[in-house]
Amino acid sequence: GATDPDTAVPLLEADATAVDWFLGQVRIRSTSDRPIFLGIGARAGVDRYLLGVDHAVVQGGIGVPGGERYRDRPGGPPASAPAAQDFWVATSVGPGERVLDWTVADGDWRIVAMNADGSAGVTADVSLGAELDGLLWFALGAIGVGLVVLLLAVGLIVAAVPRSRAR
């Protein structure tokens, strides 16, 4: 999870370039004592909304407990609450545990977690998961290639073993 009480506005603004044939559904889960906003939006819309807004961008370490790395982007508060924007393709807003499910589509997406009112001082535990629909096809392809290599190896061994001649 990601928790940073000193971060102003978005706690998470991570790149999520998606390929819909590989990724199935994405689930973002957060827990916060305050009302939190979770949103997924096209990069261009999110970037316009966050231009000049004080926030932090997750740069790596996702999935490693305590390993998240942030890049601060200084600025002021947003002009309006995030839920008032019309570029989000999926949102979840409220206190406590929030879950946002989204079926991945091709595009260049941003995931944002921030206080629902746009105020600074986001404190939340956020986790991200995804179904890897393309993994089955990748695994089946790898098994197929492995079987072809195995058959070739057996054929080469059989061809290389000298045959005894009948007396």
Image: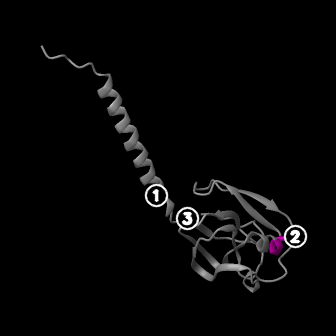
3 and 1 marks in contact (CB < 8 Å): no
Residue 40 appears at what percent x and percent y?
Answer: 67, 74
Q: Amino acid at mark 2?
A: Gly
Q: Is residue 57 magenta?
A: no
Numbered label tally: 3
Residue holding disc 3: 21
Residue 88 sits in quarter: bottom right
Q: Is residue 92 above or below residue 158?
A: below
Closer to us: 18 or 141: 141
Residue 69 vs 6, above or below: the answer is above
Provide the residue designation for mark 1.
137
Q: Earlier in the sequence, mark 3 or mark 1?
A: 3
Callout 3: SS: loop
Q: Which mark is residue 52?
A: 2
User: Given contact means CB atoms under 8 Å apart, are the residues at marks 2 and 1 in contact?
Assistant: no
Quarter that holds the C terminus: top left
- Residue occupying image coordinates x 40% and y 38%: 149
- Indicate which label's residue lies in the foreground, 2 or 1: 1
Which residues, given as a range, are shown in magenta? 48-53
Residue 52 x %, y %? 87, 70
Residue 20: percent from left, percent from top = 58, 67
Residue 7 - label? none
Task: For label 1, count other residues whose C-alpha is less than 10 Å away and answer few (under 14), some (14-19) or many (20+).
Answer: few
Mark 2 residue element: loop
Does label 2 or label 1 sit earlier along the sequence? 2
**Quick one: 20 or 17, which is closer to the camera?**
20
Name the kind of residue labelled 3 in the image. Trp
- Name the residue: 62% across, 75% down: 32
- What's the CA distance linking mark 3 and mark 2? 35 Å
